[in-house]
Image (cartoon, rainbow, N blue to C red):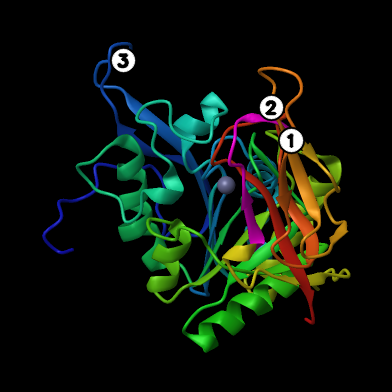
Amino acid sequence: MSSLRPSPIAPTVDFDKDGVQHGFLRLPYSRDDSAWGSVMIPICVIRNGTGPTALLSGGNHGDEYEGPLALYDLARTLDPKQVNGSVIIVPAMNYPAFRAGTRTSPIDKGNMNRSFPGRPDGTVTEKIADYFQRELLPRADIVFDFHSGGKTLDFVPFCAAHTLPDKALEQKAFDAVAAFSAPFSMRMIEIDSVGMYDTAAEEMGKVFVSTELGGGGTSRAQTVRIARRGILNVLRHAGIVDGAIETGRTQWLDMPSGDCFSFAEEDGMIETMIDLGDPIEKGAVLARIHSVGRTGIAPQELRAKMSGMLAARHFPGLVKAGDCAAVVAVEAEG
Ligand SMILES: [Zn+2]
C-alpha cells in the first residue's frame, strides 16, 4: 500500500477544522468537453471537537435516492453545536453515476461497490474508491452507506449489517442497526463481497451499517422519512449527535444462505406471485417468467428454496436470464 502514489483527489474542505464546511472532492478528469476539467463530488464536514467520526454516504449506486435525500438534508440542517466529534457527509459517492441516474458510472461503467480498494491511477470510479479507502475510511469510527434497490430491484425497507468473523465488531454493527429503527433489520450475507465498500470498511475494523430502502429508481415518502429519522438515530447512538433515539418497532430478518436468492433462467415477462413482505412456504411459486416470443408456452416457475417472507423482488416487468428475481428472508428474534 505504501508504494501507491498519492490520490489525485484534492478536497476543498479541512477535516480538522471545527464548524460546517460545504465543499468538494475535486477529481481531475480532462476530457473533450472540459480540458483540465474536474469531477466535483460534493462533501460536507460538520465538526465540533475531537470526538468520534461518522462517515455517511449515499449514491454509491447512482439510481438510489433515499440516501442522497436524507444526506443533502442532513448536511444543510445539522447544527455543529449538536455535534460531538465529526460528521463527514458524501451524499452522492459515485457522483458521475448519480448525475446520470444510473447504477454505474457513465464515464467508465464502474460499479462503485465492486471497485474497492480502488486505484489512484485507475478509472474515475477506482480513483474515488481509492480516496475512500486511504483517506476517508481511516478517519471514521462508524461508516454508514445508504442503498436502495435502484431501477431493477425493490426491497422492504431495512437497515442491515453483516454477520462477521469478528463477533465484537458484528455486535456493534447490529446495535447501530437497531438504533436506526427501520421497519425491518437485516442480518445480511453477500453473494459477491469482493470489491465492496462494506468489505473494505469491515476489513479495516470499522463499524459498517447499510440499508436497502425501497427501490425502483425512485423514492417514497415513507422510505425517505425512515432514512432521515434513522441516520439521526445512528448518530445519536454513536454519541456524535445530542438527543434521544426515536425508537420504532422493527422486525429482524436473517438471510441464512444462498438459498435466499432466486435468479431468472430465461428471458421474459415476470409475474411476481406474492408482494413484498408477504409470507412464502418452501416450494411455493415465488414468480413466473412468461415467454413472450410466441403464445402457447408454459411459464417458467421460480419456487422458494426456503420458507420466509419476500424481502426483495425484480422491479421492471421484463427480466433477462441471470437477473435476481426474488430474495426471501427469514423472520428472526432481535
Ligand atoms: Zn445500491
Name the one closer to the observer, 288 or 17.
288
C-alpha span from label 1 to label 2? 6 Å
Q: Quadrant of residue 41?
A: top left
Q: Is residue 312 magenta?
A: no
* Lower sequence index among marks 3 and 1: 3
Mark 1 CB lies closer than 8 A to ligand 1: no
Task: Find the distance from the CA under tag 3 to the CA under tag 2.
Answer: 46 Å
Residue shown at 63% from the left, 39% from the top: 150
Mark 1 and mark 2 residues within 8 Å of each other at the beta carbon: yes
Asked if residue 185 lies left or right of residue 166, the reply is: right
Going from N to C along the chain, the mark reached first, 1 or 2, is 2
Would you call the spot at circle 1 few (<14 residues within 10 Å), some (14-19), or many (20 or more)?
some
Q: Residue at x 29, y 27 (%)?
A: 29
Task: Using the rendered image of the protein, determine whether residue 83 is visible from the camera's viewpoint.
Answer: no
Q: Which residue is mark 3?
A: 34
Pick the quarter of the image with the C terminus.
bottom right
Residue 265 in the image, given as x and y percentages of width and height: 58, 41
Magenta-drawn segment: 260-270
Rendered view: 183 above or below 243: above
Instruction: Tell me the SS state at disc 2.
Output: loop
The residue that label 1 is drawn on is 299
